[in-house]
Image: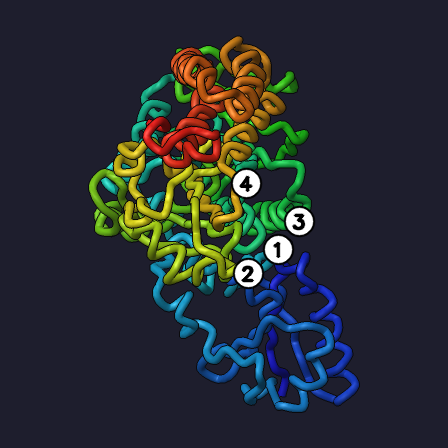
Amino acid sequence: MTVRVYIPRDSGARSLGADTVARAIELEAKKRGEQVSLVRTGSRGLYWLEPMVEVELSDRRVAYGPVNVTDIPALFDADFLNGGNHRLALGRADEIPYLKSQERLTFSRVGIVDPYSLPDYISHGGYRGLERALALSPEQIVEEVVVSGLRGRGGAGFPAGIKWRTTLQTSASQKYIVANADEGDSGTFADRMIMEGDPFLLIEGMTIAAIATGATEGFIYLRSEYPDALHTLQAAINAAVSAGYLGDNILGTGRRFLLEVRMGAGAYICGEETAMLESLEGKRGMVRFKPPVPAIAGLFGRPTVINNVVTLASVPLIVERGGAFYKEYGVGRSRGTIPIQLAGNVKRPGLIEKPFGITLREIIYDYGGGTASGRPLRAVQVGGPLGAYFPESLLDQPIDYEALAAQGGLVGHGGIVVFDESVNLARQARYAMEFCALESCGKCTPCRIGSTRGMEIIDEIVVARDGEKASRLELLRDLCDTMSAGSLCALGGLTPLPVMSALRHFPQDFGLPPSSGG
């Protein structure tokens, strides 16, 4: 009897040795005369346990991890192919507490299906959303997305349904759907996990968006640092075309949607939607003036829906189950679930999908297990390199667009990076300005010049005598106000967030008394 063994092909797992573990299991099985069928999946997102190996039994999959090549003979000796006990045994995979306590809606198949297999995707509920979409009018599809309350998961938080409705109502002979897969924020990997672990989900979401808005062509703008995602997406697109889920006649309905992947060239600024459009058009990635917004005049001047990968991947379930179903999750104006990517100085880094409203403390301690170093937590950055730093006293803050904004922060792409007491927040603030200076497209003065001046002023504050700090501090605040109000895009506009939050909550790192950070 052939035993099916699942090992991730996710690039995070591969970087930890998943490929060598897979080869070692094949060789050991052959040596012992065992019949094994290896299935390479995405990662379930428990990265501290990678490479995690799962064995399919009659009614469940049991997990072992983290597995090293040297562990393979002992695993076979322990009869792990039949669920045998071993020191690396984790029990039933879906009963691991880290996974069991999540509400995986968008990531329900990631780590379970073979990302290269269209039949596997369909057998696990794939393309049901598209089937329902084909039975609805474009207006009805858009209304389901509006009702769901889905907002842009790339960071902007703009209602996806409103964007779709704008493109639908704009008359044009050609419209486009663009997936922003230029996932460049530090500590984020949700887009990559979908593209490498469940690529048909993104394709289905983009196809539904096309039917809803009248678009006939689409592009996935993929960051150059994701070669594994490129291979997976290309294979999935080819399979979808062959099976009639993409092309000139989708499932015999006469609907047309053509899709291709375009690679970026490593510019962080191209994560900004208008700079991305410039890059897609073959130009240097520089921010455009608005209006008009891309939903009216985007790629090649035509109406274009731009959503990030997680936003589009959320659509198939919304259309299949209805917007009201999705809206049941979350709090306030933050509806549905959010994939939280936990990284930095934390014991259990990984992906956690939960409804909005979960607190930072629950994420960091209940899921992450606290700091990896064992030292006290001092700061948490939420929302990528442009996100605010929160002290331990604010960890009971719920993850919610409006709640975080009220504290001077942002949800961003859902990345959370943990720092222990050894961190120096003045250096982190300076890094934010340096990052902006390095990645600025140079089009607007507040971003291009302000970020360089910001580095200089922070350096001056740190070394200035007490009597000289006040004037430098006032200048930094004025500079941050100028960048926030005068920058063309979020790169310059949001860089002051980490700077001012570090100054507000950790003034002593700047050589200032506790009361002067405000």
Residue 278, x across and y down, in percent: 58, 18
Compare residues 464 and 163 and report the one nearer the observer: 464
Going by the numbered disc 3, the residue's amino acid type is: Asp
For residue 500, what is the image quadrant?
top left
Q: Secondary structure at mark 4?
A: loop
Compare residues 264 and 451 and report the one nearer the observer: 451
Picture layout, residue 471 above or below residue 36: above
Residue at image mark 2: 47
Q: CA distance from mark 2 to mark 1?
A: 7 Å
Query: Could you tell which of marks 1 and 3 lies nearer the N-terminus?
Result: 1
Q: CA distance from mark 1 to mark 4?
A: 14 Å
Query: Which marked residue is nearer to the observer: mark 1 or mark 3?
Result: 1
Q: CA distance from mark 4 to mark 2?
A: 16 Å
Crowding near pointer 2: few (<14 within 10 Å), some, many (20+)? some
Q: Is the N terminus in the top left, top right, bottom left or bottom right quadrant?
A: bottom right
Picture layout, residue 273 above or below residue 258: above
Residue appearing at x 58%, y 52% in the figure: 196
Q: CA distance from mark 3 to mark 4?
A: 19 Å
- Picture disc at residue 228: 3
Query: Could you tell which of marks 2 and 1 lies nearer the N-terminus?
Result: 1
Residue 423 appears anywhere in the view:
yes
Residue at image mark 1: 12
Residue 423, x across and y down, in percent: 52, 44
Is residue 405 left or right of 473 when viewed as pictured?
left
Residue appearing at x 42%, y 56% in the figure: 352
Residue at image mark 4: 186
